[in-house]
Image (cartoon, rainbow, N blue to C red):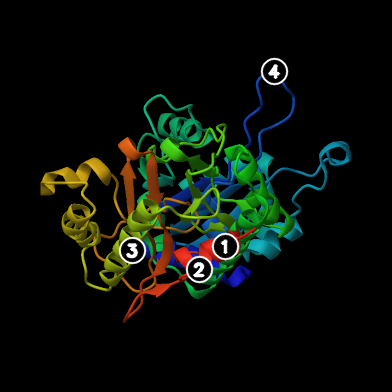
Amino acid sequence: MTSDFFTGNRESLLDKLEEGSLVLLYSGVAPVKSGDQNMHPFSVDRDFYYLTGIDAQNVWLMLSKTARGPSSALFIEQPDEELVKWNGPMLTKGEAARRSGIEEEKVRYMRDLERNIAYVLGYGVTSVYFSFDRLSMNAAPTRAEALARTIREKYPAAQIKNIHCAVSSLRAVKKPEEIDCIRRAGDVTIEALRQMLRTARSGEYEYQWAADYEHYVARSGLRHGFETIAAAGKNAVMLHYADNNCVAGDGDLLLVDLGAEYQYYGADVSRTFPVNGKFTDRQKELFRIVREAMDVARETMRPGKVMKESNQAVVDFYKKALRGAKLIDSDDDVAKYYYHGVSHSLGLDTHDPCDRTEYEPGMVITCEPGLYVAEEGIGIRLENDILVTEGAPEDLIGDRLLSVEEIEELMGR
């Protein structure tokens, strides 16, 4: 990613805003571990990153659109030589300017933040925007919320608004460089899975299978977009099972849902493998049904199609296929074996925000049909990442590790 990408994103956002707007976005800070001075790994606020390219803690972005014109500024911590000795290099004004494309003279230290906010508010600002993305009523208060309360108290004429939806709208349609990042993450994910299949063995714990995959990702210099799911046997019928602490036994299927992350853009891939390297006839039958359902859903992922059509296409396909597999007698019973949607948006977040109800060129979405047969101890999910184009959808993952024959050949000991 170049600074031009992030500059363009800021310009696109400012174009959406009315004159008299001020936007304040915070990069975030890593939470402290319980009873420990060390921090949990830091994860930057994705809206902030999308507009700056900066992944350092405790940084504010200030965008304004007033009668004086549009403006961008950053506020960073002042480097401290003593902290550098303990924690490593700190973000400098020059580095912040290089990454973001914001002029170095517009990169200031945190001590100047409140004075600059007050200055901009004096130029006819009527709306102050923050990115409020609270997951629940009981979530911990954020620094953005604290600053919003302060501004509301001291400047009651200014309206506090949420910029998250406007940024989400921009993020929904990906630019070529974003697509390249997702493609790179997908390539590493697949190669890591191949390494897992070469090394893991029947009788090992789920976490050992996951570790073989995660080791390859780490050796590739990438991170993990989300916690790896490695669910063997009956555990695979739980969609977000991530304990990974059971033995993957001979005769089990292992469902994995995982994805490497490159420059904060992640892949989201699911595959299902026979732990002993050989599908049973029943496992093979159900695997191929899910594989065909993937093709059915992907074909609907074209411009102008409504998203829910993809899921309905899978349900309609299963109405017939599951009868053939002797799983259902009534169409209503499909929901017993398939109980999630087939797609979600993908990008800087695994479940990327999206304000679309129809597919548009440039959207990247998942295609992930599944079957969950608890009474047989079988859970199967197959998931690829799809780029919506002007014509046929482009599968960024392709047919890698999606055939019985390829999997059994690779797992042959």
Query: For residue 205, which quarter of the picture?
Result: top right
Q: From the viewer's side, name the closer residue of 40 and 314.
A: 314
3D distance between C-alphas at marks 4 and 1: 38 Å
Spot occupied by residue 119 in the image (x, y as percentages of width and height): 54, 47
Mark 2: which amino acid?
Answer: Arg
Q: Quick one: SS at disc 3?
A: helix
* Picture disc at residue 233: none
* Picture disc at residue 35: 4
Label 4 or label 3, whichever comes before in sequence order: 4
**How many neighbours does mark 3 have within 10 angstroms: few (below 14), some (14-19), or many (20 or more)?**
many
Q: Quadrant of the C terminus?
A: bottom right
Mark 3: which amino acid?
Answer: Met
* Picture disc at residue 190: 1
**In the drawing, does residue 126 fall left or right of residue 90?**
left
Q: Quick one: SS at disc 1?
A: helix
The residue lying furthest to the front in this view is: 281
**Which label lies toward us, 4 or 3?**
3
Q: Quadrant of the N terminus?
A: bottom right
Q: Which residue is mark 3?
A: 294
Label 4 or label 1, whichever comes before in sequence order: 4
**How many neighbours does mark 4 have within 10 angstroms: few (below 14), some (14-19), or many (20 or more)?**
few
The residue positioned 12% from the left and 45% from the top of the image is 332
The residue positioned 38% from the left and 43% from the top of the image is 378
